[in-house]
Image (cartoon, coloured by chain):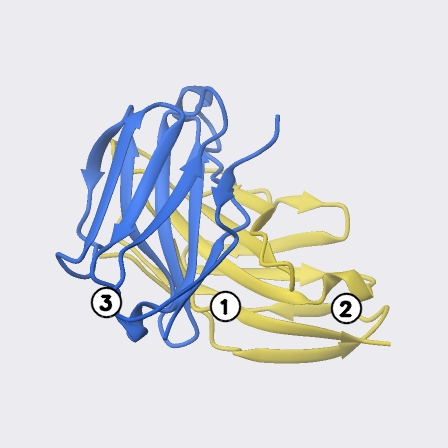
Chain colours: A blue, B yellow
Amino acid sequence: DAGVIQSPRHEVTEMGQEVTLRCKPISGHDYLFWYRQTMMRGLELLIYFNNNVPIDDSGMPEDRFSAKMPNASFSTLKIQPSEPRDSAVYFCASSDIKRGAYNEQFFGPGTRLTVL
Amino acid sequence: AQTVTQSQPEMSVQEAETVTLSCTYDTSENNYYLFWYKQPPSRQMILVIRQEAYKQQNATENRFSVNFQKAAKSFSLKISDSQLGDTAMYFCAFMKHEGRDDKIIFGKGTRLHILP
């Protein structure tokens, strides 16, 4: 398996622009998570999905952030409009609850977002 | 709410030495999982070791072992015979065992430098 795939790996944009981050989870995994990592706040869970349905979006910082999962193999995290304080590394992770025991989350390589 | 605390922001040790990373957590749950994740400079999050709270035996994975003290809510990671490739950020993490809440709570991390 190719693992969790994220695109783009790096994104530089100007304040006010719309940013869309993409994630393809591991095939067969039924949970998908979006995290944000910054030096100040560490690794924060933004939202997660189970079987394409958002379960908990309490970590989404503002209405400028939205996430969708139209099917089991694709999810997007959108920021509109973007602000400099959104600069961070955004990770996507997936897991397979059906496997039981460990519920290990497999992380993608992350997208480094810079908002100028 | 669960919290995870890593009291050592940064550590440095000589190659081949043994190093212990500290982690404490707070929860009212009885059944849960604990994890150590490694994030090397490549940014990829990699699961190092996991522990189920109901297991008294400490988990071991090659050079990595944990000291799980449930009553003290302590979960330290020991790296034996440290190698240059162990240089990374290490995150301690907690997850409830039951229910639909599949969120992982991460600590702020400990940056570990292995010196040649």
Q: Which amino acid does label 3 sit on?
A: Gly
Q: Residue at x 65, y 72 (%)?
A: B112
Is residue A93 shown to the viewer in this render? yes
Q: What residue type is labelled 1?
A: Gly
Element carrying mark 2: loop
Tag 1 residue: B109
Q: Are marks 2 and 3 on the same chain?
A: no
Direction from residue B98 to residue A105 in the image, left or right: right
| Image depth: mark 3 or mark 1 in front | 3
Mark 1 or mark 2, which has the lower sequence index? 2
Tag 3 residue: A16
Q: Do labels 3 and 1 share a chain?
A: no
| Numbered circle sitting on residue B90 | none
Q: Whole-percent x and y of residue A96? A: 44, 26
Element carrying mark 1: loop
Q: Mark 1 lies on which chain?
A: B
Figure quadrant of the N terminus of chain A: top right
Q: Mark 2 lies on which chain?
A: B
Is residue B72 shown to the viewer in this render? no
Figure quadrant of the C terminus of chain A: bottom left
Mark 2 and mark 3: Cα distance apart in space: 49 Å
Q: Whole-percent x and y of residue A21? A: 38, 48
